[in-house]
Amino acid sequence: MTDLNAEQPAGWVFYDGECAFCVGWVQRVERPLARHGFALIPLQTPWVRESLSLDKTALLKEMRLKLADGHVLGGADAAVAAARYIWWLWPLWLIAQIPGTRPLLRKGYGIIAANRHCRSGACRVPRRNAWLDWLPLVTLPPAAIAFRNPFSDWVFMWLLAFAIFFGCKWLTWRRAKHLAADSFHSLAYLFGWPGMDAKDFLTNLPAKLPDFKDWLSASAKTLLGMSALLLAVSRVGSDSPLIIGWLGMFGMVMLLHFGLFHVLALAWQAVGVAARPLMRSPLLATSLADFWGERWNTAFNKLAHDLAFRPVARRAGVSWATLGVFAISGMVHDLVISLPARGGYGLPTAYFALQGAAVLFERSKPGRALGLGHGWRGWLFMFTVTAVPAFWLFHPPFIHHVILPMLHALGTTWNTP
């Protein structure tokens, strides 16, 4: 193809033909885009610069998508528009429809584009001092707390949670970044994946390709979560505020952790990245240890095991290490739940202290004699210990001061023309 008049396709996707990373992605998306009538052309093709009316410097800054009507999109906007025509990139297109996500996608695209030539470790930054591993984790949460006053309680909760999350994310990446195949994998892990499984994500481990049942399950959970959240938003201000708050919280957990994060895991698996869902059928656990260790919100399991459980277990034994990990989890939840709620202090810590004690009892001789580590007895014990005292974890101050105002804000936003 030598000019824009040849067979007049539905559009042209222009990419950097001298970038190995870019060419690799083109090989993945070429066939589905071609089926929709798009032609993929290197930016270095002689007639492209004149067609796009760009100088040489701007030409290679980002990918471009030119539609048949002459409209041109660049960078993240071009990638999102192209993703609409590729079934396994639909999550990217859907996420881009959420208000406020486009600037984040553009920022992320800019970082990736600026580092796209870093292949096979060529651009890898040498190992720095270990204190840099911990720097975000010890600075971002205090900074969020120091600047809480301008924000409502529910916004502050998200800021604090993200500060802790990114601090942990950075820590896991710093410890495994030498395993990354290239800079793209590092950036994708930091900004495109909510898990903490840095070793698996950054290395070229074989990934199971998702099948239709996987996509159907993830989509169903996403729709269930969205439906529950919309129902809660529509009922804010009515009777039974605690019930509405719990419904909204259920909707958010189902939408994010069970739904969208599962969809994202499948999308990464579809392109060959070993990303496992964070929630792994927790209701199928037949022991409390299995529930917390292998199935529920596994993002932090590896981090807690390496940084807390193993060091304590070597010095004080498995029992104290188990209690210590649950105590740390309780304090973190107190920080993210009770501090924004301005009440209920200590209840999340008490909840996780109970979980730790129950895990030890489950593994004890009396617990084994009662059959608590397997079968229906194990499932009943797991469900009772996690569900019955859940109001300690998500206590009434949190529901009233954080969840309900957030649902009200969401309802106001969605009802704004």
Image (spheres, rainbow, N blue to C red):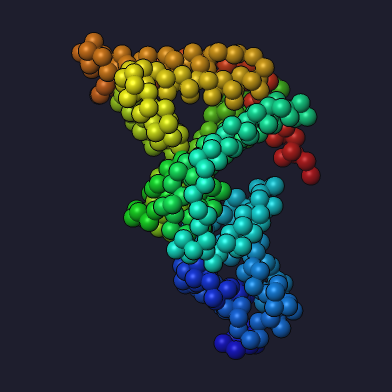
Closest to the observer, 236 or 109: 109
Relative to 391, residue 109 above or below? below
Q: Quadrant of residue 236?
A: top right
Q: Residue furthest left?
A: 369
Relative placement, left or right, of 210 versus 392 is: left
Closest to the observer, 324 or 336: 324
Relative to 296, residue 8 above or below? below
Q: Quadrant of residue 81?
A: bottom right
Q: Residue furthest front?
A: 129
Closest to the observer, 318 or 132: 132
x 37%, y 14%: residue = 357
- Residue 301 visible in this rendered orientation of the protein: no
x 64%, y 59%: residue = 110
How far from the left and from the top, in percent, is residue 144? 68, 31
The C terminus: image quadrant: top right
x 50%, y 67%: residue = 21
How far from the left and from the top, in percent, is residue 214? 40, 48
The N terminus: image quadrant: bottom right
Relative placement, left or right, of 284 versus 215 is: left
